[in-house]
Structures are given as structure tokens and as C-alpha cells.
Image (cartoon, grey):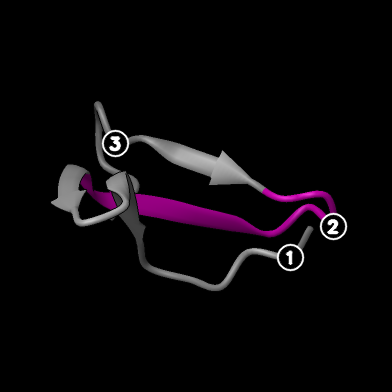
Amino acid sequence: MNGSGALIVKDATGGTADITAAGVAQSNGVIPVVDHVLMA
């Protein structure tokens, strides 16, 4: 993904993930969907 305008998050270890869907409504709130596992 990483195209122009793509949202990317970085974890504490330097790993990155693309946000593939923002604002997905769930029963416990609204979440983003990312394409990789992020470590705390």
C-alpha cells in the first residue's frame, strides 16, 4: 500500500503497518484495521 495519502502507524520496535480501513464500528467501539501485527 504505502501510496500517496496512505496512513501508516509505527510501533515501539520500529515496525510499521498500513491502516487499511479506518473507523470500523464494533460492539465495543470504533477501531482501525491494520495489515500487520504491532508490538507494544
Which numbered disc, 3 or 1, marks the residue closer to the eye? 1
Choose the circle earlier in sequence order: 1 or 2.
2
* Magenta-colored span: 11-22
Q: Position of residue 10 (x, y in %)?
A: 64, 45
- Quick check: 7 above or below 40? above
* Residue at 20% from the left image edge and 55% from the top image edge: 26
Tell which residue pokes out farthest to the right in this image: 13
Which picture quadrant has residue 34? bottom left
Work out how far the residue at label 3 is from the one at label 1, CA to CA, in angstroms.
Answer: 20 Å
Mark 3 and mark 2 in contact? Answer it, CB < 8 Å. Answer: no
Amino acid carrying label 1: it is: Met
* Residue at 46% from the left image edge and 40% from the top image edge: 8
In this view, the residue in front, 2 or 38, is 38
Residue 30: within the magenta? no
Tell which residue pokes out farthest to the bottom in this image: 37
- Quick check: 10 above or below 34? above
* Residue at 21% from the left image edge and 56% from the top image edge: 27
Choose the circle earlier in sequence order: 3 or 2.
3
Amino acid carrying label 3: it is: Ala
Mark 3 residue element: loop
In this view, the residue in front, 14 or 37, is 37
Q: Position of residue 22 (x, y in %)?
A: 22, 40
Q: Which residue is mark 3?
A: 6
For label 3, count other residues whose C-alpha is less than 10 Å away and answer few (under 14), some (14-19) or many (20+): few
35 with respect to 20 (left or right): right
23 with respect to 17 (left or right): left
Q: Which residue is mark 1?
A: 39
Q: In which quadrant of the rendered image does the N terminus lie? A: bottom left
